[in-house]
Image: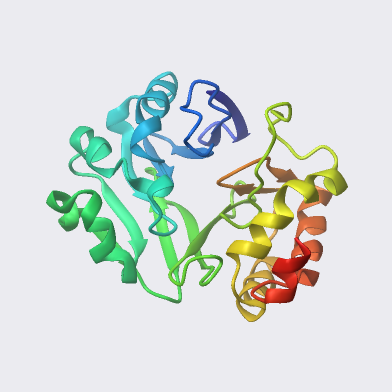
């Protein structure tokens, strides 16, 4: 996997682990993000069972596994956290922050660890990491695409983890970490968003929330990362995109 540091102020950093060339062809490519604050780490959407060895190997190059104090699961899909029993086998005391409505579904991935679940209410909330108590915000993203779904914003790093919002299905020859040509990139994400985002009202509610945030990097779970002016370009594009309608799907 390709790991790059998105932010580092000497005490708090973000690592992006992307583009695993050794993953099975039948497995969709995913991005994993690790927040390390002092001696603690938070792993976002840790991924599926099939890529667990690669993610574990990559994380072990940067921190001790014992530093992982918590996991964040944006929603219930298997590419989000079907690796749950493998991670909790290594970190049995770690907390798992999940949308409250998916508790019983995520338990199918590892029912022995339901006591580790921390239910996040619909309105979101905050969590703290590290000895300095850096706060990150859990931002509602319901119906984008899951009925119980969250993004995560770090005001210290000015990074928004957007989950499946902003996802792109990139061809093999597009392996860069960041979006380079926004207009071309639209061709890789339009079909996904039209098909998987069911509600214009829901997506626009999410857009209104995140426009209030100061964002340098918008980091999806699939595809390239938006940075700088491309963050605003994505929000503008997503806002005008018609989703959840048969006519929009037919145009794809």
Residue in the picture at 32% in, 33% down: 67
Q: Residue furthest left?
A: 112
| Image colouring | rainbow
Q: Which of 222 and 173 is in front in this view?
A: 173
* 56 vs 170: above or below: above
Question: Where does the image place residue 7, in percent across and percent down from the top left?
Answer: 62, 36
Determine the image quadrant of residue 227. Answer: top right
* 127 vs 8: above or below: below
Residue in the picture at 82% in, 57% down: 233
Question: Where does the image place residue 123, in percent across and percent down from the top left?
Answer: 45, 76
Decide if residue 208 is on the left or right side of residue 33.
right
Decide if residue 181 is on the left or right side of residue 192.
right
Decide if residue 74 is on the left or right side of residue 215.
left
Q: Which of 15 and 47 is in front in this view?
A: 47
Determine the image quadrant of residue 239. Answer: bottom right
Question: Where does the image place residue 206, in percent across and percent down from the top left?
Answer: 62, 71
Question: Which quadrant is home to the C terminus?
Answer: bottom right
What is the tally of numbered marks visible in this picture? Answer: 0
Question: Where does the image place residue 68, in percent across and percent down from the top left?
Answer: 33, 37
Residue in the picture at 43% in, 18% down: 61
């Amino acid at each position: 996997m390709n790991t790059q540091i998105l932010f580092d102020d000497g005490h708090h950093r973000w690592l992006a682990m992307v583009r695993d060339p050794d993953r099975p062809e039948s497995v969709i490519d995913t991005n994993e993000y690790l927040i390390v604050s002092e001696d603690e780490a938070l792993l976002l959407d840790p991924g599926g069972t099939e890529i667990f060895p690669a993610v574990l190997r990559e994380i072990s190059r940067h921190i001790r596994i014992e530093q992982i104090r918590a996991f964040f699961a944006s929603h219930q899909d298997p590419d989000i956290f079907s690796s749950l029993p493998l991670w909790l086998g290594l970190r049995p005391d770690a907390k798992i922050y999940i949308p409250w409505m998916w508790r019983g579904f995520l338990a199918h991935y590892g029912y022995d660890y339901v006591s580790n679940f921390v239910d996040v209410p619909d309105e979101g909330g905050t969590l703290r990491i590290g000895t300095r108590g850096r706060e990150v915000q859990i931002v509602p993203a319901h119906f984008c695409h899951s009925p119980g779904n969250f993004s995560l914003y770090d005001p210290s790093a000015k990074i928004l983890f957007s989950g499946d919002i902003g996802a792109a299905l990139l061809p093999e020859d597009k392996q860069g970490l960041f979006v380079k040509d926004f207009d071309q990139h639209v061709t890789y994400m339009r079909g996904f968003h039209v098909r998987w985002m069911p509600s214009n009202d829901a997506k626009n509610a999410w857009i209104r929330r995140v426009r209030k945030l100061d964002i340098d990097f918008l980091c999806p779970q699939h595809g390239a990362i938006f940075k700088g002016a491309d963050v605003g370009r994505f929000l503008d594009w997503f806002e005008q995109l018609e989703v959840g309608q048969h006519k929009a799907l037919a145009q794809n």
